[in-house]
Image (cartoon, rainbow, N blue to C red):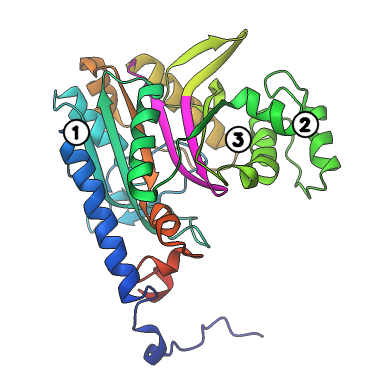
Amino acid sequence: MHSTKKPPVDFHNTWHPTATIPQLRARAKIIADIRAFFSEKNVLEVDTPLLCRVTATDPHLSSIQVPLNNNETCFLQTSPEFPMKRLLASGIGSIYSLGKVFRGDENGRYHNLEFTMLEWYRIGFDHHQLMDEMDELFQRILNSQKAIRVTYRNLFRQFLHIDPFTSSISELQNVSTQNHINAPILGDDRDTWLQLLMSHLIEPQLGNSQPHCIYNFPASQAALAKIRTEEGHLVGERFEVYIQGIELANGYHELTDDKEQRHRFNADNIQRKKMHLPELPIDENLLAALAHGMPECAGVALGVDRLIMLATQANHINEVIPFPFDRV
């Protein structure tokens, strides 16, 4: 019978940081520049809890559970979004958060279980105005050129010559086969097929000379965004940003309707059940804040470690953080 014990750790080789001291100095300067950027725009930095009683219901996010001594189970936050929206409903104005978040399945070249997220919300902005501001930040931190903007629909037309809103499942499967993607059995879920094609065939080609902003996703891929009709199909006012093939940011023209948000949370739990995942409690505090009235706004979450990777031309996230999960 094979032993399942892990080999002993050689602490003589693992105590030191994976990032060099010059890299950590560069990291500190970039974070200071981010804070200066928002200070100049009078956007207030806020603090949000890391330990929460509820978490995102999104079936594609893996929250880390934390058992407490009183038999209660809490979660490490995957994003500061829900408490930030409660602050927005309280009348705080435009805000940002710069701090740690946690995702249980995040590990690899661009992932660590614990990572730094920048999230900000601008009162009175739509997603186009927020893309403008984000582009300003990139030009400041990365010295990048102005971003290219293209709708999700035109992106698929450009790279794969298909319409993601009207193509049949078999047509999406054919594109996968023709491009030699070894896909698992994905069934008839359109979004899963679209995400497969996006990640394998389109994302690697994005943002190589300047940032790429992709906007107006299918409504089914925009759980927290306002929905509208475009060319006869429902789209979510969501955007994603890619630089050098790396997904860097995800933003929304934010949904403010509490009833619609409750419906989407419930739909998430139905999907979780289909995927044999545990159902999760809904954030009633957030829904109460939305019912009270959250101002019209747009918000975006940005991976700071990835931004620093790009700014310092690092090849792995371990080069820009002192102690990745395998050294803590």
| SS class, disc 2 | helix
Q: CA distance from mark 2 to mark 3?
A: 22 Å
Label for residue 172? 2
Residue 41, label in figure: 1
The residues tagged by marks 2 and 1 sit, at their Cα atoms, a distance apart of: 44 Å
| Residue type at tag 3 | Lys
**Which amino acid type corresponds to the residue marked 2 in the rendered image?**
Leu
Where residue 200 appears, x then y in whole percent? 68, 46
Q: Secondary structure at mark 1?
A: loop
Of the 4 image quadrants, the one containing the C terminus is bottom left
Quadrant housing the N terminus: bottom right
Q: Are marks 2 and 3 in contact (CB under 8 Å)?
A: no
Nearest to viewer (mark 1 / mark 3): 1
- Residue 189, placed above or below residue 296: below
Pointers 2 and 1 in contact (CB under 8 A)?
no
Per the image, the residue denoted by label 3 is 274
Please name the predominant secondary structure of the magenta segment in the image. strand
